[in-house]
Image (cartoon, rainbow, N blue to C red):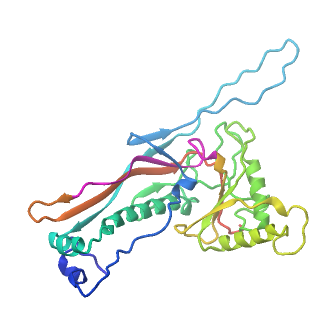
Amino acid sequence: MSVVVPGTLGQFADLVNESIQDIFVKRADFPSQMEKYFNVTDTNSYYSKDSSVTGTTGAHRIGDNASVQYDAPLQGFDKTYTQVKFGNGLEISDHLWRYGIEFRKITGLVETLTDGMRDKIEEDAADMLNNSYSTSYTDADSGTVSTAGGDVAAYFTASHTREDGGTAWNNIVYDGTTYNMDFEYDALKAARKTAAAIVGPRGQKMDFEPDMLIAKYGSSVQDRYEELQGAFTRDRIPGGNENDGIAKVGLPKAIFLKHLDNDAYYFLTDSSKKGDTYGLQWKWSMRPKMLEPEIVYDTQLYKRQILAFYDRGANDMRSWLGSTGANA
């Protein structure tokens, strides 16, 4: 159905039909999820750039009368966030407001602008994972959005550059033979193995323990997660009745998102690492704000707007693992 702007009384005959007793405004009804897996901060700058400095190497043995070995930190990778303006508006005629909207006391109509903004935010957040195996994508507004980290690689790859030039590190779920393992019991064990192999900028071991799963709501991953949960509750190996003593490899807590697109994709992160250094970042310079009503002088046209400024991205994804579930 096409939308005619501004809305006029002629488009809403039901609003002045007194035989109709109830008029309902259909609003979205879902909780916000973005802040559960993004590190959210505020900024006053149009451009925000984060960087890092590596630590020194590990300590060395010093022989009798020998000198200590000196080291210096290295420059880390940069990531720039550029604020983008987002918004939505409502425009209705004086007649529609006075004899339709106001007459029916449908104050929730304006609040649908808030729903639309929230849906946009959730969609933009999930799209960073939907496109996390690429370095950029085109969003619904035809804008180009970067999904490259500070090392200019995709968020999930087997060849992340290391700051000291050492061996590249991998954050795709891998058991030593197969990458992008489908979500099964063996993938949970492989995820721990993959996390243990991720090293810091100077090759140092990291305290990375994935404890949160993110996947599509209603997906095969969610179904299998709940099946595994049932098996673990009974101390059984999934798919059988035996108990080999390691069934308690454990399930991470889970978030299932309706804005994710791919049935087999899943992601694991260490929630304790959510902060300015690692993982997905959301930068607000203006959080969603409903502007004051405006009345056009000549026509008494009623206008409302909601606006926000933000950008999102990531510099260092050492606290995340991903899998397409392709077993390739």
Q: Is residue 34 above or below residue 51?
A: below
Is 276 magenta? The answer is: yes
**Percent of width and height locating residue 88:** 32, 62
**Percent of width and height locating residue 89:** 28, 63
Residue 142 can be seen in this image: no
For image coordinates 11% across by 66% down, the residue present is 299
The quarter of the picture where the C terminus appears is bottom right
* Residue at the bottom extreme, as displayed: 19
Q: Is residue 222 left or right of residue 96?
A: right
Q: Which region is colored magenta?
A: 273-293
Q: Is residue 269 left or right of residue 68?
A: left
Q: Is residue 204 above or below residue 268?
A: above
Q: Is residue 284 above or below residue 127?
A: above
**Percent of width and height locating residue 119:** 44, 64
For image coordinates 42% across by 41% down, the residue present is 43
* Residue at the left extreme, as displayed: 298
For image coordinates 53% across by 54% down, the residue present is 35
Is 270 magenta? The answer is: no
Relative depth, front residue between 328 and 11:
11
Relative depth, front residue between 184 and 238:
238
